[in-house]
């Protein structure tokens, strides 16, 4: 058993899918960006730099164009809605301690990657530990942001595995909560869901999926798979042993939480530590996935060692050699389950 989180894909993983755009599509992406620039907050607004950070991400404009099926007016409408939503929720500034209680039972866990380099979010409704509240949705958003932090270069999507083992009618989310979750995924994290996998769904809860089916757009519905062979999708070394993998992970809330917060460089106030403004450094001084359990349990699982090995993870068509590097530690700055 290990308490160490997997924060990098399996060695040799080729990131997929890789999107290629025509000249016309590239021009549409540029036009969407020009329109978005007219909507940005004034630079004097405290949230401006975080909004600009999101807009500047290389996948943001293409994702909205793909979601709109390359209809520019629709993409403009979609991104306007997300800008409004992000200003209200401010996903980048959710304080870890504000949602930490929601994670105590491990009802949402970010751990491991599939064969295409997508980070995996495990959702276990049977571990529900709180009453329905806006904090549950903020907790989900916090994990979506962390999954994006862990995406290797070139990866834009994630995997969600919903495990209904031990779920009861009491712990299963209501249809109204599920519809809000779907709204967040489909409207504000467009083209981010790579796969949605449902396992151990009891017959008793079939009505639940019938209830939420009207809220599923066809693209999301096509990404859903029920009780598939997970080893066809996820390397055995990256798949939790509860699902037939070799990764025997022991959940310890405090140790797990600290590893995620440290790896992503999140400060107590929800901002980012120095060097982490655009997400975790491309080269961590010491990756938590390479630490021993002794380091993890002793609280030394932080980017403080002088050397590291960089995993060979590439986008399709790219070649990147396995390498070693000497790096200095980063100094801190004055960053409902389905």
Image (cartoon, helix red, strand yellow):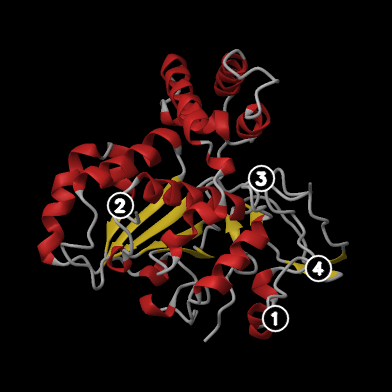
N-terminal label among 3 and 2:
2
Q: Quadrant of the C terminus?
A: bottom left
Query: Which residue in the structure is indicated by mark 4?
Result: 304
The answer for how far apart the CA atoms under marks 4 and 2 are is 40 Å
Which tag is nearer the camera, tag 4 or tag 3? 3
Query: Quick one: label 1, few (<14), some, or many (20+) residues within 10 Å?
Result: few
Query: Which residue in the structure is indicated by mark 1?
Result: 295
The answer for how far apart the CA atoms under marks 1 and 4 are is 12 Å
Determine whether label 3 and label 1 are within 8 Å by CB: no
N-terminal label among 2 and 1:
2
Residue beneath the point at 46% across and 67% down: 234
Determine whether label 2 and label 1 are within 8 Å by CB: no
Q: Is residue 310 left or right of residue 208?
A: right
The answer for how far apart the CA atoms under marks 4 and 3 are is 20 Å
196 above or below 321? above
- Mark 3 residue element: loop
N-terminal label among 4 and 2:
2
Query: Which residue in the structure is indicated by mark 2?
Result: 224
Which tag is nearer the camera, tag 4 or tag 2? 4
The answer for how far apart the CA atoms under marks 2 and 1 are is 38 Å
């Amino acid at each position: 058993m290990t308490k160490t989180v997997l924060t990098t894909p399996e060695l040799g993983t080729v990131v997929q899918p890789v999107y290629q755009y025509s000249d016309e599509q590239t021009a549409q992406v540029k036009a969407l960006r020009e329109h978005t620039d007219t909507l940005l907050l004034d630079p004097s607004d405290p949230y401006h730099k975080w909004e600009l950070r999101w807009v500047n991400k290389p996948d943001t404009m293409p994702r909205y164009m793909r979601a709109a099926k390359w209809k520019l007016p629709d993409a403009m409408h979609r991104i306007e809605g997300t800008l409004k939503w992000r200003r209200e929720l401010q996903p980048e500034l959710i304080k870890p301690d504000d949602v930490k209680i929601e994670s105590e039972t491990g009802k949402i866990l970010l751990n491991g990657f599939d064969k295409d380099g997508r980070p995996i979010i495990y959702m276990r409704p049977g571990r529900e530990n709180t009453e329905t509240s806006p904090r549950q949705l903020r907790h989900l958003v916090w994990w979506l942001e962390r999954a994006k932090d862990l995406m290797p270069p070139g990866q834009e999507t994630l995997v969600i595995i919903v495990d209904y083992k031990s779920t009861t009618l009491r712990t299963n989310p209501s249809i109204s909560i599920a519809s809000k979750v779907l709204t967040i995924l489909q409207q504000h994290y467009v083209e981010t869901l790579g796969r949605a996998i449902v396992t151990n769904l009891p017959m008793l809860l079939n009505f639940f999926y019938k209830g939420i089916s009207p809220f599923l757009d066809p693209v999301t519905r096509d990404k859903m798979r029920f009780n598939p062979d997970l080893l066809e999708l996820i390397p055995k070394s990256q798949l939790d042993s509860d699902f037939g993998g070799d990764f025997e992970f022991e959940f310890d809330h405090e140790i797990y939480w600290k590893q995620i917060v440290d790896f992503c460089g999140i400060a107590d106030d929800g901002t980012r530590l120095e060097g982490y403004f655009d997400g975790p450094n491309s080269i961590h001084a010491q990756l938590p996935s390479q630490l021993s359990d002794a380091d993890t349990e002793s609280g030394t699982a932080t980017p403080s060692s002088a050397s590291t090995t960089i995993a060979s993870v590439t986008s399709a068509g790219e070649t990147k050699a396995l390498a070693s590097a000497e790096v200095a530690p980063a100094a801190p700055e004055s960053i409902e389950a389905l």
